Amino acid sequence: MRYYIIAGEASGDLHGSNLMKGIYAEDPQAEIRFWGGDLMNSVWGSTALKTNPDLHPVSSGLVRHYKEGAVMGFVEVLMKAGRLLGNVRFCKKDILAWKPDVVILIDYPGFNFKIAEFAHKAGFKVFYYIAPKVWASREGRIKKLKAYVDKLFIVFPFEKPYFDAKGIDYIYKGNPLVDAVDGSAAMNESRADFLDRNHLEDKPIIAMLAGSRKGEISTMMPVLTEFAAKMHALAEYSEYQFLIAGAPSRTIKDYEPWLTEENRRYVKVLFGQTQSIIRQAEAGVINSGTASLETALFGTPQVVGYITNPITYRIARKIVKIKYISLGNLIIDRLAFKEFIQDDCNCDALVAEIRELIENQERKTKMLSDYTDIRNALGGSGASSAVAKAMIEELTRK
């Protein structure tokens, strides 16, 4: 069968890649055409042509890389509206030309709802994988889910009662991030190998994740480098190294404005090492998103920091109706780790919290206990394969 998959950001690329592995395992002759990133492209390149040598390489594979369109926030979307609409038009034409058996949309609601409406009206089967966060804001989108999506695949346990109450049929098979973390190279890599591979000294590590979008990086990097400088100035932390996880699809140029000759002695940017950095760190300052849930699954103490455009923030405060911005906290409905947002996300607050997580064993033990509750709530392994199998069963059902 033919599968047209659309993922618009780094987290979608991760989940899309694992979903593709499951699809190829269940349907070895699958043809997959996709919008995504390096991870999805790697699965396609290493699997599709090997399992199906007669596959025409032009008819499937990567259509557009998510770095060409990933934006977040109301103001940011308006600034990039022309490019996004151009991508929507191109995607519609591409779907019509390729004629897939199903269009699979992964999160990324601003773009994917437009495609869902189009694909449904054009007669294509539409699956939505990783539900748009209608439980957080823009609940009016539920009407679109009911009207344009044939089957919704959710990944968080707290979504089940919500969608039950809304009368939306769904399939829940656990959370794919559990597989992504447990099966990662980072989980099985020794500290010595990590240090050697990245030419690092054997010194304690603090992870710093500024986000994956350019806008997030530009707002978080000033605070993170100031935080690192203040920590480094403390005698007990003068030997620490502060590792910035370079986001996929970004380059060192995105970080250089905040790197100086002085802080480069203890601040380093590593690309393609996000999970390894998280796992090897004593603690981390994590931009809210999938990374904060990954950090919980890896068992690394964290504080979440998030800063966005002031106008975007003011709008969000009026329409977002959830208690927490981090998935881990939402899953257990309490603060496993603190969240510092906008003005509260400042150097002094981050220094105080990271010191507390490193120096206060009781506090660290409590956080790790909460992490266990988060992991247990997400279910066991095999979610990606189970979802792929369920999708194929839906497509072949008479």
Image (cartoon, helix red, strand yellow):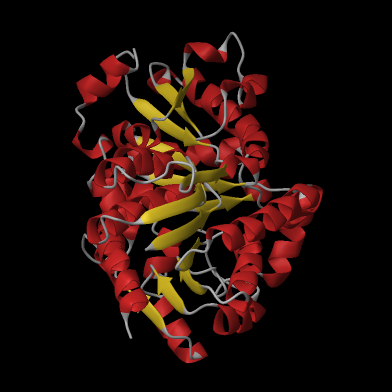
Image location (x, y in percent) of residue 385: 26, 61
Lateral position of residue 335 relative to residue 145, left or right: left
Q: Is residue 335 visible?
A: no
Nearer to me, 250 or 281: 250
Name the one closer to the observer, 49 or 182: 49
Q: In which quarter of the image is the N terminus?
A: bottom left
Residue 161 showing in the rendered view: yes
Which residue is found at the position 27% from the left and 43% from the top?
361
Question: In the rendered picture of this protein, how many numbered marks are placed on residues?
Answer: 0
Quadrant in which residue 223 is drawn: top right
Q: Quadrant of residue 121?
A: bottom right
Residue 218 x %, y % = 67, 34
Residue situated furthest top in the rendering? 261
Foreground: 295 or 46?
46
The residue lying at 24 percent from left, 61 percent from top is 26
Q: With respect to residue 73, does 394 lie above or below?
A: below
Q: Which residue is depicted at the point 65% across and 61% down?
A: 92
Kindly identify the residue that appears in the image at 66 percent across and 58 percent down.
93
